Image (cartoon, rainbow, N blue to C red):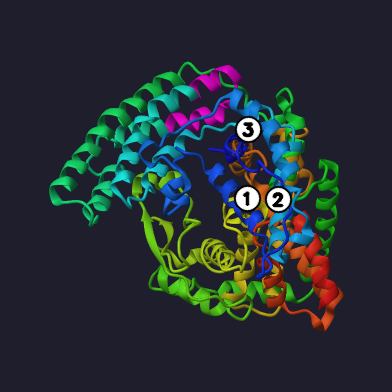
Amino acid sequence: MKKTLTILVILINLFGCQFVSSPSNDGTNKDFESALDTALVSMIGTTDPSSNYLLEHPEEYDVDVEHYAFRLGSEEDFEMSKDLIKDIQKNIRKFKDRTLSDQQIIDKRVLLYELERMASGYQPFQFQVDPELDAIPQYLEGFTFRTESDIRGYFSLIDSIPTYFDESIAFYNKTEMMTQFEHEKLTDFVAVMKEQSLSDDFFLIKGFDSKISSLEFLKESEKTATIQENREAIRDVFYNAFVKLENDLKTVKTRPNRGLAHLENGKTYYETLIPSLSGRNLTIPEFQMWISNRRIEVYQRLKAVETSNKLQEYQDFESKQSAPDYKDAYALIDDLYKKSLRDFPEIPEIPYKVYNIDASLAAISNPAFYYVPPIDSNPDHTQRIYINSTFDPANFTTFAHEAIPGHMYQTQYMRGIKGMHPIRLYIRNNAMTEGWAQYVELLSVRYLGGPKGYEDYIRDLYESMYLILLEVDIGIHYNDWSREEMGAFFDSVYVNNTEEERDEIYRQIILEPGNIWSYYYGAMSIQSMKERAQKELGDAFDEKTFHQMILDLGSASFDTMDILFDEYLQTQ
């Protein structure tokens, strides 16, 4: 479920007073800190189920743990919150920079940017709400039981599923926003859930049994009763909700498989969506100019390799290269930690555990994914990484993306930034978060060996693909390209993929408008900053220092990063 609406709706009590007091003895403004505490509590919401994994102690944030509920949010909620966000901006600006510590100034700058993005964007209700019904089972699977109240909250969450499904169907019928692709995908998923939920091996039964059996605060008789209660809830409430959803989907009117520009106001919405997902406040033509300029740089480097003896050297290396040899995911991640020390700031080793995704979720899951730890947990909190099916060391760069030096490393680094308010762990800029992980995924190729320049060559090959796909995303969602027009574009830039591959690209871009921008544009923005630093600093450039500069800011927009990047260039 998209967070934009939730954040807007529940920020009512963020700032009610004007705080302009002087810094305390340690340089921090306690009133500002208190105000952000209030903001964090207000953002989370009293029955938002995300509190279960966002917070280790949700009761301390006024969360009604026993009454979690999936909720879509109403159009009235949305309209009311748009005015509130402007008041919040006005109040936070009343904290003068001279009264804040250096870190608080950064926190203020980052928060104001995100609030401005929410307030100024054109955000019709139908574009901002995304029910994501197929995420419900994974939400339940990742639920953590710390207290008996969590158990009650879990069953409350299951009880809310039928109403949530009904709200979602009503939304789709009212807005006619569901594409045929989305309908097909959801229909197939519902059929699988309906069938599997009747089996004792269903992951929401088998996994629940294991979790409850390990709880120390329940007696054996209570464990037995709780396990039985879950089986009944899954086979009654959960199963019947999916049966009804399957029938209701047959009545939903779908729209053609076309991009946002095919919808009323869709093109205007896309103009605000991409700045939000990319972390840069540019127009679509300005983004296209950036793509064009970046493509020239990348293609020139690729051409230089292909017209030299380097290409044959790289091809010879690839023909002899074998998959890395690791006995399990732990060995691979631990090796990534050691190898990355020369390129990234050292942090204490991170406690983590690797889990296997249940086979019933394999078809809809990524090769691996990472669970962000609770924002109020201790640094030694054991973090979670999930892998799909059996461990395959060939997914080396994927583990770099999800673990070290990717998401898990970046998150743990942020948790250790001195003086940074925890609200920054809650409000993240997706372009910096996913962009960083995508950037280090390509960088990790160096840890697999290879001749000099090979890592740069591989990165440029990937970037050439990224740039084409960003242009395709604009074509489909801004220029209303059809599948045939997309194919013609591929032909014009000499992309020789198959028709089946083109079908899948078109399908994914229709299903997830703008999603690739956070990953691809984010990664290339970091890389282009590094190239500029290398050029301007020459021998004074140090890659580890460059990475530290980015990490020290935390998750923030590239517009915000640009200011600190210029300062970095001047001080090196």
Considering only vertical position in the picture, is 566 above or below 132? below
Near mark 1 (Cα within 10 A), the count class, few <14, some 14-19 or many ≥20, is some
Q: Residue at x 61, y 69 (%)?
A: 418
Asked which secondary structure carries label 1, the reply is helix
Q: Amino acid at mark 2?
A: Phe
State which tag comes first along the sequence, 2 or 1.
2
What is the x, y in percent for residue 309? 76, 77
Q: Can you tell which of label 2 and label 1 is closer to the viewer? A: 2
What is the x, y in percent for residue 463? 71, 58
State which tag comes first along the sequence, 1 or 3.
1
Pick the front one: 412 or 396: 412
Considering only vertical position in the picture, is 93 above or below 294? above
Mark 1 lies on residue? 35
Mark 2 lies on residue? 19
Tags 2 and 1 touching, CB below 8 Å: yes
Near mark 3 (Cα within 10 A), the count class, few <14, some 14-19 or many ≥20, is some
| Residue 172 included in the magenta stretch of the image | yes
Q: Can you tell which of label 2 and label 3 is closer to the viewer? A: 2
Region of the chain picked out in magenta, as a range? 168-188
Q: Can you tell which of label 1 and label 3 is closer to the viewer? A: 1
For marks 2 and 1, give the CA distance: 8 Å
Q: Quadrant of residue 424?
A: bottom right
Asked which secondary structure carries label 3, the reply is helix
Q: Which disc number belongs to residue 128? A: 3
